[in-house]
Image (cartoon, helix red, strand yellow):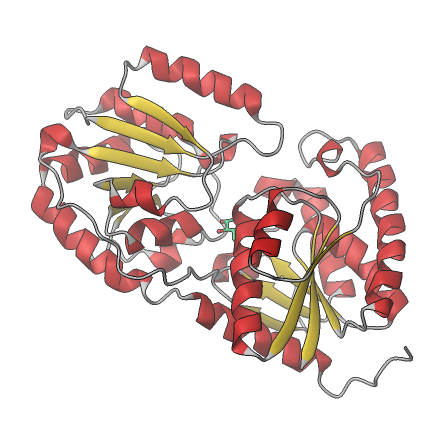
C-alpha cells in the first residue's frame, strides 16, 4: 500500500483544507492508499482529522504563513519567506524519512516549496494537488510564472481541481490529471418545496474574502424587482479578513434587514436545504467551487459565475444558471427570473440533485490514487 503524506500549511477549515479532509478519508476507506496528514500549523483542521481517526502530525514552527500573502508581500518579503519555507521543508524531510513515506502531496503553493525540499531530503516523489488557478489574475504575472515553473520542476505529478486549473499549469512530461473535489454521500437531503416569490430565501456560501464577490450580490440585490424574504451569507474569515466582514455588514445595513450573516460552518448543507436559490458570484474564475456542488446536491436552484470550475459543473438552463462574473445586472436578471418562477426553480433544483451525484468523493479518491500509483511505481526503494 502506498504511504502518502498530505502536506498543508494551514489548519483553517477553508475550502481546500476541507477537500483534503474528505479526500484523505476516502483514500483510507478505499484501502489503496495509507494516507496521513502533515500540518505546519495547528487549528480546526487538525481536530477534524483526529475526529475521523486520520493520522495527523503537527510540525510546530515559528513561521506565520499569514504574514506571507500574494497581495501583501513585496519581492524582498517573498524571497525571505521562500527561504523560511525551504528551511521548514528541510526539517520535514526527517519526519518523512522516519515515517517511511512513499510520496508527498503538497496542498498549496507554500507547501509546494516546503515539499520540494522535504521530498528531496527523503528521496521520494512530490505531487502537487492544485486548488488555485496559477494565473496572473490571482498571483500576478511574475509570481504565476514562477510558480508554474517551480511546480513543473519539482513535482512529478500534478492533480488539478478542474480543467480550468489544469490549463494554468505546465504539465509536459509530468503525470497530470483532473480530480474534481467530490462531496460525501450523507444520505438523501430533505428539503421543503420551492417557496412562493414573496417568501424566497437566497443563500451564498463562501469565505468572506473579496474575490468571492459578495459585492456583486449586494449590487444585484439593490437592482431586484422582487424582494427576497432573506439572503443568508454563510462563511467565515480565516485569513485576516475581519475588516472585509465589517465592510459587508455596513453594506448589509444599507440594504435593509434581508441580509443575515451565518458565519463559518464546516457543512453548509442545512443552509442549502432551507434555501430556494443559491448564488455563487466570484469575480475571478473559481478554481472549482465545492459550494456549487453542495448547493446542487441540496436541490437549490443555482446561479453561478460562468468562469472556471462552475462551467464544468453547471449545464446552463438544465441544472442551473450561469451569469458573467462581476456583472450585477446579469445576476439581478437571473435572480428576478428565478424568484418569479417557482416551477423553473423546481425543475433546475431536481436536475441539480442528479448532477451533483456525479461529483462523489470516491471518484476523486480513484483519480488521486491513480496519480500516486503512477508516480511511485517502479521507484527504487530509498535507503531508509
Ligand atoms: C480552493 C478553491 C475552490 C476549490 C477548493 C477545493 O478553495 O478556491 O474553488 O473548490 O480549493 O479544491
The location of residue 325, given as percent across then percent down, is 39, 39
The location of residue 313, given as percent across then percent down, is 36, 58
The location of residue 196, given as percent across then percent down, is 8, 35
Give the residue at x 43% y 32%.
Answer: 213
Give the residue at x 25% y 51%.
Answer: 320
Q: Let me know if residue 323 appears in the view.
A: no
Q: Let me know if residue 180 appears in the view.
A: yes
- Quadrant including the N terminus: bottom right
Q: Nearer the viewer, residue 237 or 319?
A: 237
Residue 196 against residue 303 in the figure, above or below: above
Q: Nearer the viewer, residue 261 or 131?
A: 261
**Left or right: where 71 falls relative to 249:** right
The location of residue 221, given as percent across then percent down, is 27, 24
**Left or right: where 29 falls relative to 76:** left
Number of marks in picture: 0
Give the residue at x 40% y 66%.
Answer: 360
Image quadrant where residue 384 sits: bottom right
Q: Nearer the viewer, residue 259 or 334?
A: 259
Image quadrant where residue 202 sits: top left
**Left or right: where 104 falls relative to 319:** right
**Left or right: where 272 falls relative to 125:** left
Residue 349 against residue 218 in the figure, above or below: below
Give the residue at x 66% y 32%.
Answer: 71
Residue lying furthest bottom:
378
Amino acid at each position: 500500500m502506498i504511504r502518502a503524506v498530505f502536506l498543508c500549511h494551514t489548519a483553517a477549515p477553508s475550502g481546500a483544507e476541507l477537500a483534503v479532509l474528505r479526500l484523505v478519508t476516502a483514500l483510507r476507506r478505499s484501502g489503496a492508499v495509507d494516507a496521513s496528514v502533515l500540518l505546519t500549523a495547528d487549528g480546526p483542521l487538525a481536530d477534524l482529522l483526529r475526529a475521523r481517526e486520520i493520522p495527523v502530525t503537527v510540525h510546530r514552527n515559528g513561521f506565520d504563513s499569514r504574514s506571507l500573502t500574494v497581495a501583501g508581500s513585496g519581492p524582498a518579503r517573498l524571497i525571505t519567506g521562500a527561504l523560511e519555507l525551504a528551511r521548514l521543508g528541510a526539517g520535514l524531510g526527517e519526519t518523512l524519512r522516519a515515517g517511511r513515506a512513499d510520496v508527498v502531496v503538497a496542498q498549496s503553493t507554500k507547501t509546494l516549496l516546503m515539499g520540494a525540499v522535504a521530498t528531496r531530503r527523503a528521496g521520494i516523489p512530490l505531487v502537487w494537488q492544485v486548488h488555485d488557478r496559477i494565473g496572473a489574475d490571482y498571483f500576478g504575472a511574475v509570481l504565476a510564472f514562477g510558480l508554474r515553473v517551480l511546480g513543473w520542476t519539482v513535482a512529478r505529478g500534478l492533480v488539478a481541481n478542474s480543467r480550468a486549473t489544469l490549463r494554468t499549469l505546465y504539465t509536459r512530461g509530468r503525470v497530470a490529471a483532473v480530480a474534481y473535489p467530490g462531496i460525501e454521500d450523507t444520505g438523501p437531503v430533505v428539503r421543503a418545496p420551492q417557496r412562493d416569490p414573496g417568501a424566497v430565501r437566497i443563500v451564498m456560501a463562501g469565505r468572506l474574502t473579496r474575490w468571492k464577490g459578495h459585492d456583486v450580490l449586494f449590487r444585484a440585490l439593490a437592482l431586484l424587482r422582487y424582494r427576497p424574504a432573506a439572503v443568508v451569507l454563510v462563511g467565515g474569515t480565516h485569513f485576516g479578513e475581519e475588516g472585509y466582514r465589517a465592510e459587508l455588514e455596513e453594506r448589509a445595513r444599507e440594504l435593509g434587514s434581508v441580509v443575515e450573516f451565518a458565519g463559518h460552518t464546516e457543512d453548509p448543507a442545512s443552509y442549502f436545504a432551507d434555501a430556494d436559490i443559491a448564488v455563487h458570484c466570484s469575480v475571478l474564475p473559481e478554481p472549482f467551487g465545492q459550494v456549487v456542488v453542495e448547493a446542487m446536491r441540496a436541490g437549490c436552484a443555482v446561479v453561478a459565475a460562468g468562469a472556471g470550475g462552475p462551467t464544468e459543473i453547471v449545464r446552463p438552463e438544465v441544472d442551473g444558471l450561469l451569469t458573467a462574473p462581476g456583472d450585477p445586472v446579469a445576476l439581478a436578471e437571473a435572480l428576478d427570473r428565478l424568484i418569479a418562477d417557482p416551477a423553473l426553480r423546481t425543475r433546475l433544483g431536481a436536475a441539480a440533485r442528479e448532477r451533483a451525484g456525479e461529483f462523489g468523493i470516491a471518484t476523486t479518491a480513484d483519480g488521486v490514487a491513480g496519480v500516486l500509483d503512477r508516480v511511485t511505481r517502479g521507484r527504487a526503494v530509498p535507503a531508509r
